[in-house]
Structures are given as structure tokens and as C-alpha cells.
Image (cartoon, grey):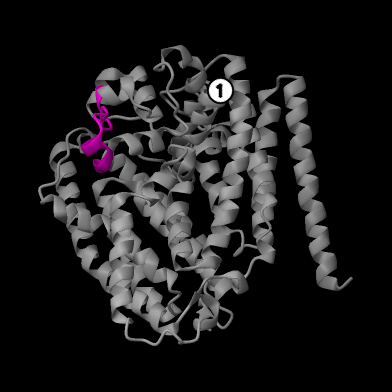
Amino acid sequence: MSFLDHRYSKKIIVRNSILFISISFFVIGLLFSSTNVLVWSLCFMLAHNLWYACEKFSERIIFFAFNCTFFTFLVGRLVIKTFTGYVDPWNKSRYGLDFQGDNIILSIFIILFLGLLFLYFGYRVVKNENFNFKKSKLYSIRRVESIAFVSKYLFYLTYIFNVLILRDKANFTDNNGYYELYASYTSSYPGWVEKLSQMCPTALFIYLGTLPSKRKSFFPLVLYVISGVLSLIVGQRNNFVLNLLIVLVYLCLRNITDKKQKWFGKKEIISCIVSFPVIVVILNAVSHIRFESSSAPKSFLDGISEFFYNQGVSVNLIGYAQTLDQQFPVGKNYTFGRIIDFLNNNSITQSIFHVPKYNPQTLESALYGNNFADSVSYILSPSRYLKGWGYGSSYLAELFHDGGYAGVIIGSFILGIILALMIRAFKHSILGIWMCLSMTRLLLYAPRDTSTSFFVSTFTLINILTLFIIFLIASLLCKYKSERSPLYTLGEIRQ
């Protein structure tokens, strides 16, 4: 055994030891009904998952990023409250939860642990190490260049309309307030402007799917980050963070596809570490401005604690899935709610069948739709909900509501498999890279979003139309090329 193999095996032993400790703490916490011990088990389980991801950071970047968002939205509040003694003037309960009952708190911790554990098990099922570009789709050089040309300039064109829509939303929130954006916003631009703006991400992801060089990728990626910054002006922090995460994911995955150049190395890692606290401060500031809060953190560390504590509010949804169970509409499936609503509400279905259409943030959606976020928000505060307020959702809350602990175990296992398959999709084809980037963007938001948003938001009619336009024009551009042109994998073309 070489020195590197020996060192790697020692890392695996340490990681497995952390996994054993986390499971041991979980069992002890269950036996003695100790929530404090269960908090430790969650911390060890997260540490294990992040350690596992860091062993092959570029290959497992999506798994790493998901565990980070899981911590931020579902575990951060518990950890901050337990280990820093953070004081919330509006919530004096243990762990910063909205519940006092030991059984509910215990159940929340069990669901969180099972979610992390079976996410890991599901991810391990897929062996990405044995899947490479040799199994990828074959292209001619002319075809890849044509797709890159069309998608890049379509991105630049639709980016203009994307900026116009963001500016329109910013003006609206400035005049009417943030909550009204979800309650009464209608664009001041014609519908076709909105549709063109919605084409922008797909056009970018297809261009990135052609594996352009680092130099050629730089400007489109910068524009994508800038659009996230513009979302901050609107008050939408999630778009800014998700855009940054997708750029990070893409750079890391290009380490796998590009053997000549390092896309994400030590310099980029240091830049991320240095910029992280600055980003947290900015996000905190946007939150205070959005809600017109007069209070501010006393120190920089207080600001960090406040950020993770506030972001972790979504953990309460897991508790509400239990305490409000009898008040939810009967017979609704929230796990697949987005898919059900998409099938019912799209323009094709509406033109053929007389199926009721429930728009988000409406009374009808809360009472009769399959949207967990709308239903729970309406039950908690009907008047605020109708004015645009919402608690959001969480895939774990939906899984537990629909299937109990078994639903959490099965759903988390499947989610782990999906996260791993994203790497295979990235290695497979241009469409595979588009699907990977588009799905991953909302998969990373699943701890604070619905279970199937990543699927529905990827295969919308406007996205499919965008793909059709790009590939049609690209085919027309290279139609005179001989069919006998040699075919290569994407990796071979871009080397």
C-alpha cells in the first residue's frame, strides 16, 4: 500500500468513526429521550457527510452543497441556540422552536437525523467513479460549436429582458413592500417580455453544457452572478445565493471534465472562505431592509449567529406537519404536489379539460390545492397569508406529512440517489449538463422548498421551447456539414 493510499484509508477510518459516533448518540438519545444528545448526533452526522464530500470535493460538490443548505435551513437554528446561547426576544423556547412538547421536539430531531443518514446511504448507492466520458453522447465538432453559438447569444438577448423584469419587481417592492410582490404583483411589461426573460437560465446552462473554455465562460458566469445581485435589490436573497452555488458547482465539476486546466483550486477556495462572512453580512442587511427592522447585530459574530438562527426557521415546518395534521385539507399529496399542480394548471391541460386552476398565494390554493407552503401559511395566519406572507415549505415536512417516518427514509434515500445522478448527467451530454445545473439549483433549496420543485421547474413549457429553439437553429447552421464528420465525446472535443 502506498503512502497516499494509507493516508486515504486513515481518513476513511476517521469518517466511519464519526458515523458510528453519530449513530450511537442517536440511539442513546432515543433510549433516554434526550434532545441534547440528539443535537450532538445531528452535528456528528453533518460532520460525517461533509467529510465524505471533501474526500473528493469536485466529484461530490453537489452533495457538499446540499448538506450546507440542509444545515442552514434546518439545523442551524438548533445549533446556534444550543451552543451560543443566542437570545431571541420573540421566542424563549428551547432550541428556538415554536413548540414546547418534548414528543414533538424529539420527533423533529429524529426526522432530521434520518433525513441526513439516508441521504448519505442513497448517495453511496450510485458509483460515479466508474462513469466517465467514454460512456457519453457523441457529437461532431461543428454541432457543438453551433449549439454554443446559438445558446450564448440567446442568453445575451434574454438577459436584457431578465434585467428589465428584475428592475420592474424592484420598483414594485420599493413602492408597495416586499410581501405585496407575492400577493398582487403583475408585470408592467407585456407577457412576451416575461417569457423571454424566463428563457435566460436555460440558454446559459445549454451554453455551459458545451463546455466552453474558462476564458469564454467567465463573462456569462459574471452576468449570472450580477442577476443574483439584482435579485437582492428586489429582496429575494435565495436567487442570489442559488446563483452563487450553481457557479461554484459548475466550476468544481469542470475540474472533472477539463484535464488541462484547474477551474476550482486553492485560490478559489480561499476566495470563498474570505467572501463568506461578507456575503452573510450583506444577506443580513437585506433582511433588515426588507422587513424594515430597526435593530441590528451588536457585533460581527452576533450577525453570523443571527443569520443562521433566522435562516433555520424552516425546521418548525417539520413540527407543524405533525401538530396541524388534522387541519390540513384531506386527501392532499404534498410530496408530489408541484407535479400534480403542474399537470392540472399548464396551458395545454387548461385548454382541453375543465380542471380547476389554483394560483399560488390564494385562498383556493390553500384550501384545495396541493401546495404545503400555502396550506400551512394559511392555517397559521390567514390574514397575513392573504397579504403575501408565507412560511415556505420543506421537503422533509412534506415527506413526513405524506408518509411518516417511512416516507422520510424512502424520500431521503431517493433524494441521495438523485443528487449522485446529477454528476452522471453532467458527464453524459449537453442536455445532461443543462438538466444537472437546472435541477441542482432547486435541489439545493429543497430544505426550504417543495419536494419536486426541482423537476417541475426544469421541465416547464418555456424551458422546453427554449431547448427546441436552440437545437433547431443549431441544426440549421450545420445542416450542410457532411454526415460522415467524425464524432467525439464532449470531453474529447474540449481537450
Point 29% across, 29% down: residue: 389
- Seen in the picture, residue 445 relative to 60 is either above or below; the reply is above
Could you say where residue 23 lies in the image, as x and y percent from the top left?
76, 36
Tell me which residue sits at (15%, 54%) in the image: 192
The question of residue 110 being in magenta is answered with: no
Vertical placement of residue 284 versus 383, above or below: below
Q: Residue furthest right?
A: 1
Q: Residues within 10 Å of mark 1 (few under 14, many from 20)?
A: some
Outermost residue, top side: 326
Up the image or down, 372 lies above or below 442; here it is: above
Taking the image as shown, residue 423 lies to the left or right of residue 120, namely: left
Report whether 92 appears left or right of 192: right
Residue 335 in the image, given as x and y percentages of width and height: 47, 32
Residue denoted by label 1: 94
216 or 39, which is in the foreground?
216
Q: Position of residue 475 (x, y in %)?
A: 33, 75
Residue sitting nearer the eye, 86 or 402: 402
Vertical position of residue 32 compared to residue 260: above or below = above
Q: Position of residue 361 (x, y in %)?
A: 27, 30
- Total number of numbered discs in the rendering: 1
The stretch in magenta equals 346-363
Residue 198 relative to residue 445: left or right:
left
Screen quadrant of the N terminus: bottom right
Q: Is residue 266 visible?
A: no
Q: Amino acid at mark 1?
A: Arg
Foreground of the two, 47 or 350: 350
Q: Is residue 173 visible?
A: yes
Q: Quadrant of residue 287?
A: top left
> Residue 89 is drawn in which quadrant?
top left
